[in-house]
Amino acid sequence: MILFNLFWSFFKIGLFSFGGGYAVIPLIQTQVVYNNNWLTQSEFTDLITISQMTPGPIAINSSTFVGIRVAGLSGAIIATLGCVLPSCIIMCLLAWLYFKYKHVDMVQGILKSLRPLIIALIASAGISIFTLSIWREGNISLNPSDIDFISIILFSLALISLRKTKFNPILIMLSCGLIRFLYFFIYK
Amino acid sequence: MRKNLNTYIILFTSTFYLSAVTFGGGFVIIPLMKKKFSDDLKWIEKDELLNLVAIAQSAPGSVAVNSSILIGYRVCGVLGALITILGTVLPPLIILSTISLFYKSFSQNVIVSTILDGMQAGVAAVIIDVVINMGQDIFKEKEKLSILLMIITFILSHFFKISVIYLLIICIAIGALKTYLNTKRKEKK
């Protein structure tokens, strides 16, 4: 029964999480903290912190985290399955429609006007992460004590190597982490 | 469509690898997918990838998972979708299962947090780099409507925090209206 509850709750989270990212948090909170008491509020806050520190979408991370605490590994797998099942069904359906009708003018026209939006959304995500890495405390000002200068240097070096060299972006991201780690241990 | 064991293996390993290194969630994975599937493997054209991301964003679920499913479907049909979904979901499943065992010490670990702080700057650079490339493509098309849409939706989303759902509806409506007017104009001629 507990496995079914896990599956059903995360199925609903997967089905209603429009917009992605942080928009999903209240939805997960309702299911996990208020409706089912699987996590306390403070455990839920920990979950969000961990989600930000690890790869993977918040909804999937929550499925695993909650599932494993409630019913062990099988709970984690069932909850994750419930969470991705709506995506899987809806996406296969939309993909089928897209490949069938992608040459229709109307579909082309709509997709063409969605492209600028997708670029804008990616830009917005990038700038949010940029400001977060430069102004760690959240006060955006020109006051030197608020600015993280290592981040500015790392960002500039990374951007230059991305645009001028053929280094793998993943390698560049990991190097940034490593450089900061080395700096931290040499100077502090 | 390609259907052989080798393709399945590449699909699985690529999505597994991308999902395992995508810190920062959501849109971070798109630039990496573009590099892998359209620049390196040349399986999907850049414009088509953007179409797929647009579809992924218009449906419930996370953009990363939805985009992977669409890429899998595009390359190998439903089986491809199942393979990419497995590849995308396994890394968080494994990582979170491990971390949930000792999560207090993980989230307070100085080494982990310093490395992640550094990676954040790198992640920002990766995203900005792709935005510059894609933005240039839009400007090169010299279509005023696209450029205008890009700038306005950016401002609405970034500064006014307008929900993605409304922006999607607006763009779909504008696209539909424009196509309708274009076909009308052609009919008159």
Image (cartoon, coloured by chain):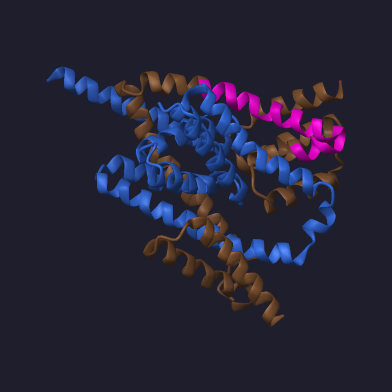
Chain colours: A brown, B blue
Which x, y percent locates residue A78? 76, 28
Q: Is residue A82 magenta?
A: yes
Q: Is residue B128 magenta?
A: no
Comparing A156 with B93, the one in front is B93
Seen in the picture, residue A50 relative to A81 is either above or below; the reply is below
Comparing B185 with B46, the one in front is B46
- Taking the view exactly as shown, the residue that stands out farthest to the left is B189
Seen in the picture, residue B152 relative to A92 is either above or below; the reply is below
Which x, y percent locates residue B99? 78, 49
Comparing A108 with A71, the one in front is A71
Seen in the picture, residue B153 relative to A184 is either above or below; the reply is above
Question: Residue at point 44% right, 61% down?
Answer: A167
* Relative to B25, A59 lies left or right: right
**Magenta residues, dominant SS class:** helix
Q: Which quadrant, please, contains the N terminus of chain B?
A: top left
* Relative to B99, B120 lies left or right: left
Q: To which quarter of the image does residue A160 belong?
A: bottom left
Q: Can residue B94 be seen by looking at this rendering? A: yes
Q: To which quarter of the image does residue A41 belong?
A: top right
Comparing A93 with A32, the one in front is A93
Q: To which quarter of the image does residue A74 belong?
A: top right
Q: Can residue B160 be seen by looking at this rendering? A: no
Which x, y percent locates residue A163? 39, 62
Question: Residue at point 59% right, 42% down?
Answer: B16
Task: Give the extent of the magenta segment.
Answer: A64-92
